[in-house]
């Protein structure tokens, strides 16, 4: 294979970003072609590289970048089935996002900088995927972080966007600090930062501190992939443009942490304690985020918490020792979650609000956006995990991996010994994943029914009762759409492009076994027991949510409120009282947990009390000491020198008689002093 091809895959989007920034203001007409064509060409090249590499093959190439006096740094490319699969996913989603953005942000004056950042974001993720050196991978890792800061804060004139971008940057950096130390430990133990050398050292038992190293790396993974306890930035990141949410949640930033653990899984298999920690982290993330999603009124925040939970599935599969199942779900989820976010953008464009309850008061919404309506249904079925869509096969692969790990027969596919995976990790993931499947089905059904199928007779005309929460989380974007204008084709056809892998990727990958052959060679077919349990839990969740919705709507149907006129658009609002919807099945299902779940179970408030306020107080103390103590001494020294200078200046009169008189007086004093 010509190495120029894989080198061009991350290079083309980076060059496109530079060209877009250089010409954006002078020639704005070139911004859209420069945004789309390099990313699309990169996606095609990624597919060509994958086809040339074939299945069951790998390629490594490196050139020394810089001597360090210790482990060297190299520009290294590593290609295998995992890089092939994820690079094609990144290219596909990024291309759809760039095309979609040309219509979604067509009137945005900052579109050129936005498009350039999206291209740079894509290049950084592709660098992470193809890099064979941990230091070079770290470069892509950090570039994604700074791009996310600018993209989430794209609408910087709003306070929500500014605070969300800053929060995302700080929380992910909190995880990145120990992550960097983990990389340094790996390099020191292996004598090299090349991933192949690190894995060889892990196989030979030369990693001196496997538990410490794995835990340090997990801190960075928790921040980047939004796992508990560093997950809080992701729901707030919904203040950014919707296409950015699709890119971050589907194929780039949040996928990077999962991909890294999959690449370094032999290192994690050296520490059973680290695997248990990963399993607990995944279990808490799965269940907690699913409960939060069931309580949200903001459509994008529902999808954000859904992403957090699905990343928990992937982390759980890694804790069970099966990276094949984890990456299978990563790719499957990347397709249907990108579809969900882009379809949500179409719905928000039509409804002029993120609020699900506000959408319920707009009769005929589903007829206004038929493409988004049907593709949202397809993606939600995949999210729930019903056959034959891709989400079913990938979710069942995770459950099967957890089942094998729980029985002491972990499926590591030759990456490490099965005995390295504690049975406790398997049981934790299995129970949490089964419960999450039920809750996921419930919140997906709630979203579908409340947004698109609320009967006109169940729509309240009166404001919400006093019990409504005026401070419910809400992440609106700046409203740039015209509700009377139909969505352009650039916002519609990417939905159907992503609907194809959402429906067919699972069957195509498992039926012919080309996907297992592409990866580690293990089976990805679901076991009968987990298939029945997982699908049964999903069906139960759907039925429970439907029953709660019917019950909630029936209770208020008797009021017979006046329905909104056909085609009317509710005024955009957040979660104040006017947006409260009494027939919310989430309130019925969660009961007393509804309010805590809506506010993320108070994790943000806890961090504010334990971290933000103490750090703010310490900053105020430091500012006081600097301004009132240190600067006082500095100013005192300056004032003293100034006064001394003034005293000396008084003696300099320019009168020669005064100088002679002073000289004689001095002589007399010296003579007297000597005589005495």
Image (cartoon, grey):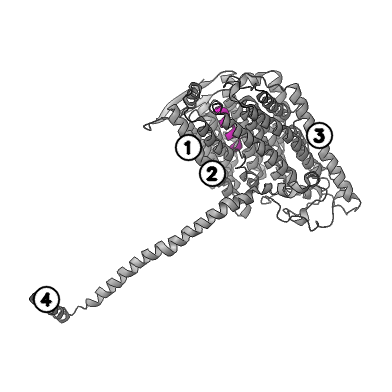
Q: Residue furthest left?
A: 675
Q: Which mark is residue 673?
A: 4
Residue 413 sits in which quadrant? top right
Looking at the rendering, in which quadrant would you find the C terminus? bottom left
Q: Quadrant of residue 250?
A: top right
Earlier in the chain: of badge 1 and badge 2, it is: 2
Q: Residues within 10 Å of mark 1 (few under 14, many from 20)?
A: some
Above or below — where is 289 with respect to 56?
Answer: below
Mark 3 surroundings: few (<14), some (14-19) or many (≥20) residues within 10 A: some
Residue 167 picture location, percent across and down: 58, 48
Q: Report whether 531 appears left or right of 232.
A: right
**Mark sitting earlier along the chain (1/3):** 1
Which residue is disc 3 drawn over? 540
Q: CA distance from mark 1 to mark 3?
A: 45 Å
Residue 69, how many percent across, how many down? 36, 32
| Badge 2 element | helix
Q: Counting residues from the N terminus, which is met first, the one under dot 3 or under dot 4?
A: 3
Name the side, left or right, on which 399 lies relative to 638. Answer: right
């Amino acid at each position: 294979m010509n190495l120029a091809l894989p080198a061009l895959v991350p290079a083309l989007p980076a060059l496109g970003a530079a060209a877009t920034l250089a010409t954006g203001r002078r020639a704005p007409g070139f911004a859209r072609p420069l945004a789309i064509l390099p990313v699309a060409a990169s996606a095609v090249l990624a597919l060509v590289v994958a086809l040339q590499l074939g299945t069951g093959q790998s390629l490594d190439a490196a050139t020394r970048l810089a001597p360090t006096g210790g482990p060297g740094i190299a520009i290294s490319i590593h290609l295998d089935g995992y890089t092939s699969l994820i690079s094609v996913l990144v290219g596909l989603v990024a291309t759809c996002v760039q095309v979609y953005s040309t219509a979604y942000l067509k009137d945005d004056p900052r579109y050129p900088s936005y498009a350039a950042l999206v291209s740079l974001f894509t290049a950084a993720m592709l660098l992470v995927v193809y890099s064979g050196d941990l230091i070079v991978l770290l470069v892509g890792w950090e570039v994604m972080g700074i791009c996310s800061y600018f993209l989430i804060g794209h609408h910087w004139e709003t306070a929500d966007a500014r605070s969300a971008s800053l929060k995302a940057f700080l929380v992910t950096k909190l995880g990145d600090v120990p992550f960097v130390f983990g990389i340094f430990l790996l390099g020191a133990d292996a004598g090299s930062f090349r991933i192949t050398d690190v894995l060889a050292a892990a196989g030979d038992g030369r990693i001196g501190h496997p538990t410490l190293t794995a835990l340090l790396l997990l801190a960075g993974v928790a921040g980047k992939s939004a796992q508990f306890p560093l997950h809080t930035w992701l729901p707030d990141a919904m203040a950014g443009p919707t296409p950015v949410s699709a890119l971050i949640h589907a194929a780039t930033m949040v996928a990077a942490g999962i991909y890294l653990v999959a690449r370094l899984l032999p290192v994690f298999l050296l520490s059973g304690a680290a695997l248990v920690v990963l399993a607990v982290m995944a279990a808490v993330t799965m269940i907690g985020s699913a409960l939060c999603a069931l309580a949200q009124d903001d459509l994008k925040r529902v999808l954000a918490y859904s992403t957090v939970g699905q990343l928990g599935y992937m982390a759980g599969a890694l804790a069970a020792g099966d990276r094949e199942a984890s990456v299978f779900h990563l790719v499957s989820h990347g397709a249907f979650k990108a579809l969900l976010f882009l379809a949500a953008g179409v719905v928000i464009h039509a409804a002029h609000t993120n609020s699900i309850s506000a959408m319920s008061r707009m009769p005929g919404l589903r007829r206004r956006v038929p493409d988004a309506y049907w593709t949202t249904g397809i993606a939600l079925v995949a999210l729930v995990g019903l056959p034959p869509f891709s989400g079913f096969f990938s979710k069942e692969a995770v459950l099967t991996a957890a089942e094998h790990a729980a029985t002491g027969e972990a499926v590591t596919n030759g990456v490490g010994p099965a005995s390295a995976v504690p049975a406790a990790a398997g049981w934790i993931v299995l129970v949490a994943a089964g419960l999450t499947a039920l809750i996921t089905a419930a919140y997906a059904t709630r979203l579908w029914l409340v947004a698109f199928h609320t009967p006109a007779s169940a729509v309240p005309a009166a404001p919400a009762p006093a019990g409504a929460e005026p401070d419910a989380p809400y992440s609106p974007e700046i409203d740039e759409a015209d509700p009377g204008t139909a969505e352009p084709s650039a916002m519609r056809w990417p939905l159907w492009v992503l609907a194809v892998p959402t429906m067919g990727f699972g069957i195509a990958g498992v039926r012919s076994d080309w996907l297992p052959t592409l990866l580690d060679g293990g089976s990805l077919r679901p076991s009968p027991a987990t298939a029945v349990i997982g699908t049964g839990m999903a069906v139960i969740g759907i039925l429970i949510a439907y029953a709660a919705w019917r019950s909630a709507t029936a209770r208020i149907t008797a009021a017979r409120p006046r329905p909104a006129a056909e085609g009317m658009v509710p005024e955009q609002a957040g979660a104040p009282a006017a947006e409260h919807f009494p027939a919310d099945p989430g309130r019925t299902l969660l009961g007393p947990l509804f309010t805590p779940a809506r506010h993320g179970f108070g994790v943000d408030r806890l961090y504010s009390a334990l971290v933000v306020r103490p750090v703010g107080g310490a900053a105020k103390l430091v500012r006081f000491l600097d301004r009132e103590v240190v600067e006082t001494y500095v100013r005192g020294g300056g004032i003293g020198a100034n006064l001394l200078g003034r005293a000396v200046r008084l003696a300099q009169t320019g009168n020669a008689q005064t100088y002679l008189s002073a000289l004689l007086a001095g002589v007399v004093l010296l003579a007297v002093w000597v005589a005495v």
